[in-house]
Amino acid sequence: MSEAAASGWAAAMPSLVAELRAYPGRWNVALRCLLSCAIVIVVSQALQVPFLAVSLFIVFFATQANLVLTRLVGLLMFLGITLAVAAAIVLAKFTFGDPAWRIVAVAALLFGCLFLMRASRLGPVFYIVAVVITAVQGYFDLIDSPELVVRAILWAWIAAIYPLTVCVLINALLLPAEPLQQLKAEVQRQLAQVDAALAYAAGERSDAPALAAEELSHGVLAVQKLLRFAWMRDKAFQGGQARHLVLAAALASLREQALHLQPAGNAAAGSIAALRAAVHRLDACIRTETPFDLHGLAIPDDDDASHAPPAQMWRTLRALSERGEQPADAAAATKGGLLAADARSNRVYVQFALKTLLAMMACYVFYVGADWTGIHTVMMTCLIVAQPSLGASSRKIRLRVIGALIGGGLALFLTVFVIPQLDTLVGLLLITLPVLAASAYLSAGSERVSYAGMQIMFTFSLAILGDFSASTDLTGIRDRLVGIGLGITASYLVHTLLWPESEGKPLVQQIGALLRSIAALIGERAGAGTLAASASSSRAWAALGACEETLSRVAFEPDWQQAEGEREGTTLRLQNLLAQAREILLDAGALRRALDAHVDRFDASRRDALADAQAGVAARLQRYADELIASGDMFPALPPDAALPVPPAAGADDAYAAARRQLYRLAARVQYLTTSSARADESFSHREAAYT
């Protein structure tokens, strides 16, 4: 193994270990999925319902993190499967005796589904329709009788719908994962991190994991997502949206301030202990859904005279207990139609449909021309790995290959050494359930690994559970792996050579939108309110989390069409942009809290001077963000300002001097970001020293 490959594996191992680590609720999802699979296997084998592998695929697809998602996905799958089966029956009625027209009709249906996958709000429904039509296409080539084709289609509908019903019932009745309970557990975990940071400041140890700056955006996204699910699940809970948004903003503010905590002396021990008690009370109030207050806690009297993290945390908690402030109302979301706003003007949607259809039809022509019907799933492979971007497609391809190899290897081993010794259903369950359990656990992970679990299950099930009796035929395993390899090759070549769709430029524009929101946060005048500022900051953290998710896909984009080192340089530059945006957001939050703490103590001239300096910093960052959005160029650079827009020093006012120092640091960091494109390797501390 080369040194580069070894270093690549060494760098990937920590991420892989993190992806395999259990998180709260992961075993719950895996157990619900495993129980549904066991019931489906017993029922299908006892009643001889065909297409068992498809039934298990439906179970894996429908089992989601919580009950709301499971019901929503179940409804969409029911609609999609039923619509696709109806279309397949109509197709069989009018085109069974005419293969040429059948292929044209299938191609037209697939093109429409692929287009609507990208251009419609009901994309998952049309994806399911495309999957079913692709699967049914193989029946026309394998079965000579139209009556038998229709029966096979109807059996496919039964094999898909009844496990969907079993899955929804299991998720609703046994081990139900309620979004509200998941939300409380997530809030409890984040508050435990805040408490651990306070324990560190007090010189004590805590079992909770330490909080890192990279986790802030993910935490904000997790709370926002679970809030939406909880509102969908419980109409009564939905009535308290304003209070929930206040709590979410306060939580984001507490975690952001906890990052800046440093070991405190004995003089601050009482304040830290009281802060920990207040955090524990907030946790209890959230769990019991009771109002939060600070009665009985020793709140320091001098917290208004300091912008240190403990004082800022007290200010956030006090604003939360008084609830006199509400986060600024977000603009009401306009409900669009079925199609995306740019469905008729964006060529990307049509190009995506044409590319995917071309790969599928090329594979169809190959396996029909070669009379190799055993690899008919090659068309399905082209459909499954077709994603909106090269990075997402490459990641799906890797997961599909890895999953197929693992699932096929396990099936091969069991077929050779174990299957010949089996003669009961119990024995079949003993060898299949452990594999399904591991697959379900992997499938319950993040999108970076989840599809590998589903692919392990599907490849294994096709080989082991394809018949109603023990089979030692290895041909199916071989054909399955060959079909996957051919489909991946065709899809990869078509999507990389024909209208390649990279997310690099959209990510740059997404970062520009993030910097715009940070500029708006910087430009807000002090005095808008503690929780209002926290709400604006939490929205920016959520946008940062979305950018990081996009970057994780960009890193998977193929680089064989680029010059050596070009992709690595692009990824490094995007990582650098996001890292600097994160630091600017942290500094902007610290500045905002410092100004809100002391704005009432400044005279009008100092307030105006600080506001003018804020506006100057925000305007520069806004210009840079506009350049990113307009050009999509990740290397723009603005000419440096002659002097940083920092208000002049005045007197010996410690509060004003502290706000001025914070504003100076923020201005220097923005200046560094907007002029450092040509020297991305230069550290901020080195550049800041030059400004000093």
Image (cartoon, helix red, strand yellow):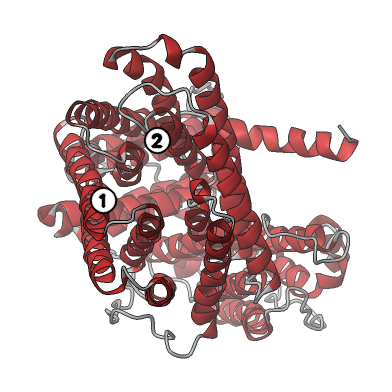
Residue found at the far bottom of this picture: 345
Q: Is residue 491 above or below residue 40?
A: below
Report the residue at 48% width, 37% height from top: 459
CA neighbours of label 1 inside 10 A, class few (<14), some (14 to 19), many (20+): some
Identify the mark nearer the N-term, 2 or 1.
1
Label 2 sits on a secondary structure element that is helix
Q: Position of residue 164 (x, y in %)?
A: 22, 45
Q: Answer left or right for 357 relative to 16.
A: left
* Amino acid bearing label 1: Ala
Tag count: 2
Report the residue at 52% width, 40% height from top: 452
Q: Answer left or right for 631 relative to 30.
A: right
Q: Answer left or right for 231 relative to 406.
A: left
Q: Position of residue 632 (x, y in %)?
A: 67, 79
Residue 557: in sight, yes or no? yes
- Closer to the camera, 7 or 159? 159
- Closer to the camera, 34 or 58? 58
Q: Is residue 125 above or below residue 224?
A: below
- Closer to the camera, 255 or 441? 441
| Mark 1, residue position | 152
Where residue 553 sits, quadrant-wise, is bottom right
| Mark 2, residue position | 189
Residue 212: in sight, yes or no? no
Report the residue at 34% width, 53% height from top: 143
Task: Say which mark, if any, is on residue 47.
Answer: none
Q: Is residue 5 above or below residue 558?
A: above
- Closer to the camera, 619 or 510? 510
| Quarter occupied by the N terminus | top right
Residue found at the far top of this picture: 421
* Amino acid bearing label 2: Arg
> How far apart are the alpha carbons under marks 2 and 1?
49 Å
Label 1 sits on a secondary structure element that is helix
